[in-house]
Amino acid sequence: MGFLGLFNRSALPPADLSVLKTDIHSHFIPGIDDGARNSDESLEMLADMAALGYRKVVTTPHIMSDGYRNTPEIILKGLERLREKIKEAGIKIEIEAAAEYYFDYEFEKSIPKNDKLTFGNKYLLWEMSFMNKPENISEVIFEMVTQGYKPVLAHVERYPFWHNDFAMYEDLARRGTLLQLNMNSISGHYGASTKKAAEWLIDNNLISFLGSDCHHKGHLDLIKKALSEKYMHKILASGKLLNDTL
């Protein structure tokens, strides 16, 4: 049976995440944000990621001026400690670190310093408030691009202020922002409107990175359930994802 025949079945087999090779959004470094609380939790989640077929993860702790005031030094020291634990545990997975930057004044003013933690070829993961869209988003995207970054907007489908204006997604892409989608949005975990936005983005081939955004074991359990969703199969077969280039 060809792919289209498989895609039209009501119940699909679990999708194979090994085609992604790399996850680019997670919170595995213990004790520095709202992700893993200790190294045991980190190792349990990383073992699950390896079992799902991932060869590498780029973990991305939060950096926000009013919340998690992480620095590159804090993140990279945590990364080295976690790498040692992974080696000791014998888990077959690579781990690198970048950050998930929160769009606030401190982030905005620091962009010209060109000192951000990135992954791949200067991919810069950033997020914004779920409540209010920043008025100067276009200017800040322009500044990131001018500094040589490739902006990657985290969990783009989860911002409710765009749920009635899907054209804004296309505008973001035109301005040079790559869009990252959370796998659990496909299953409806974040609500019906987020699921609808995720499906529209997949249908319109606007997603460049698929991410776990894993904070705890429950997120991984939900991802395993989402693997049989037809839109999970569709995005993995789209040929648009860049995860496997890292």
Image (cartoon, rainbow, N blue to C red):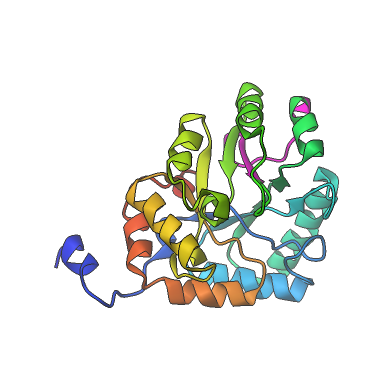
The answer to whether residue 121 is magenta is yes
Task: Please tell me which residue is depicted at 79% across the width and 37% down the height of the picture.
Answer: 105
Q: Position of residue 167 (x, y in %)?
A: 43, 41
Q: Hey, which quadrant is residue 56 in on the image?
A: bottom right
Task: Please tell me which residue is depicted at 71% across the width and 45% down the height of the picture.
Answer: 101
Name the one closer to the observer, 196 or 1: 196
Is 50 situated above or below 199?
Answer: below
Q: Which residues are magenta?
A: 113-126
The answer to whether residue 99 is magenta is no
Is 111 situated above or below 180?
Answer: above
Question: Which quadrant, please, contains the N terminus?
Answer: bottom left
The answer to whether residue 115 is visible is: no
Q: Position of residue 182 (x, y in %)?
A: 52, 59
37 relative position to 227: left or right = right
Task: Please tell me which residue is depicted at 79% across the width and 31% down the height of the picture.
Answer: 110
Name the one closer to the observer, 112 or 23: 112
Q: Position of residue 17 (x, y in %)?
A: 43, 63
The answer to whether residue 196 is visible is: yes
